[in-house]
Image: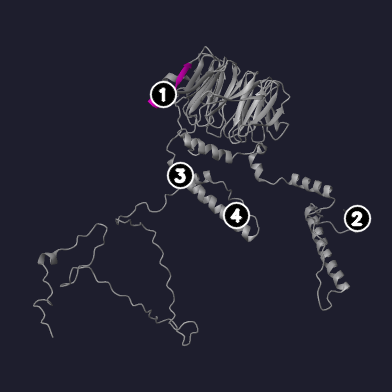
Amino acid sequence: METVPKPGSNVPPKKDKLQAKKKKPRRYWEEETTPTAAGASPGAPRKRKRNRELRPQKNTHIPKKSRISKKPQVPKKPREQRSTGPQRTLSGAQDPFAGPAPVPVEVVQKFCRIDKSKKLPHSETKIRSRLEAAEAQEEEISVEAARSELLLAEEPGFLEGEDGEDTAKIRQADIVEAVDIASAAKHFNLNLRQFGPYRLNYSPTGRHLAFGGRRGHVAALDWVTKKLMCEINVMEAVRDIRFLHSEALLAVAQNRWLHVYDNQGIELHCVRRCDRVTRLEFLPFHFLLATASETGFLTYLDVSVGKIVAALNARAGRLDVMTQNPYNAVIHLGHSNGTVSLWSPAMKEPLAKILCHRGGVRAVAVDSTGTHMATSGLDHQLKIFDLRGTFQPLSARTLPQGAGHLAFSQRGLLAAGMGDVVNIWSGQGKASPPSLERPYLTHRLSGHVHGLQFCPFEDVLGVGHSGGITSMLVPGAAEPNFDGLESNPYRSRKQRQEWEVKALLEKVPAELICLDPRAMAEVDVISLEQEKKERVERLGYDPNAKAPFRPKAKQKGRSSTASLVKRKRKVMDEEHRDKVRQSLEQQPQKQEKAKPTAARPSALDRFVR
């Protein structure tokens, strides 16, 4: 039964005139489209269906019988390269700075550790590919390090006088008035005449300060916030004080023995094997506490396990002048005969001895790069030495009073304490020696100086004297940016604990301390040959010697006695030729005497040698 369609069911609905005239607004990132043809609907354009079958081109040759495929072979079109122009974002706007930020070549070279002037050795393909991959990775790392340098927004400070004014005449009060409030709060004086004179030490992060008086006063505080951590009186003379790997442990050289305290003032250890200690130095990467005593012994104490690593007799009498080289962890000792000796726990004898002064040595200091050493003696001389193998003096200056204490800053400034006056000299840069012609700053204290140290990552010089503690402002003394993973002044207790675990896992053995740390990456050929010779003498034969040639047995009558002897003799002749060739290459080539060309040949020329 057929049904009658409803009226108007097949008739398309009429469109509104306003809807037909209304156009879609064009955004600023869209390109202009061509106007639609007359009578065409303004709706979205229809998608054309692409023909999936590939049509053969005119110039292509199609074989009649193809064993591989019956489909027509079409040459592949090359992939379209991505345009290097400005890229569009999701919103459609163009990025005016597309791609990574460009890095200057000079900045990249500062972080590059590979010398590209040296060619790679001719080795196997596998080893050469590994070297090339390592070189490419090192170059990529240097570029990333140079790019991340933009994040180091802090710049080192400086002090300049107006119209040729001498900066040494600028007082600390004038500097405090010129700087901001936060920097001005870093200058302070602690009046502690009752228990002086004082020795002081800053923590590796530069946030905490510990000081000890000759009459037994020991204290530690957060000098930035002025919050006191602990304060005790040990009822015994204090000769030196040092922070260990963190601000939680404190080593104090008392009159008789060495004591270790925590940040609450509780005594943890009493090391009686280190007695009559006069000076302390802590090696952070080796976890070693070096002590110099009145008896003339230099002792290394491993604080991670609590054992004495080495006890070395310097054979130079009382030791009261000691410092460390931050670059290679070598201990420098000053003696009364005017020499400075360099020591390592791996050697019972000094690595080197340098004659510095005609009289006794009063103070020694080494800069952070390990290239320059400053010494002062009883002859009132202040000298700067080059430690890069020559050990020669670079500059010298005669002072009206001999400098009793010396200290280098992170950026190469040199501070010297002479009586109640502190002089500071500056250089051209971090790696350059300080110029001793004119002082950079001068400050007079209320007592005689007994200790100097620059605060890490702060333009501050801490001075311990007979009247207490003074914190001086020295613009341009410290590094403005710190490594948050190594020395973070703002780390929490959890972060400090995690850093301690990581530092213990990466502890450097004491046997690796030497003058040149780069020598550890080289092969000690002399020791290797000596060990090989001793092994041969002990066993009676060389286990690594080449086994004699034994010809392999062959079939079909080719393994006769004559054939075997012939093959053995052939191998022996080849080895003999190789030895002769090597010996000829090692011998120096004799230069033949030039014969005069103009003279006539003579029968006596055969006797000329």
Distance from the alpha carbon under mark 4 to that under mark 3: 26 Å
Q: Magenta stretch containing residue 407, yes or no?
A: no
Quadrant position of residue 2: bottom left
Pinpoint residue 494: horizontal percent, then vertical percent.
Answer: 47, 36
Tag 1–tag 3 contact (CB < 8 Å): no
Distance from the alpha carbon under mark 1 to that under mark 3: 31 Å
Q: Earlier in the sequence, mark 4 or mark 2?
A: 4
The residue tagged 3 is 148
Magenta segment: 176-190
Pinpoint residue 479: horizontal percent, then vertical percent.
Answer: 49, 33
Q: Give the residue displayed 43% in from the left and 42% down from the top.
A: 150
Q: Earlier in the sequence, mark 1 or mark 3?
A: 3
| The disc label shown at residue 605, or none | none
Of residues 91 and 249, the one nearer the viewer is: 249
Q: Earlier in the sequence, mark 4 or mark 3?
A: 4
Distance from the alpha carbon under mark 2 to that under mark 1: 92 Å
The residue tagged 2 is 607
- Would residue 30 be visible to someone looking at this image? yes
Mark 3: which amino acid? Ser
Q: Residues within 10 Å of mark 4 (few under 14, many from 20)?
A: some
The residue tagged 4 is 131
The residue tagged 1 is 184
Mark 4: which amino acid? Leu
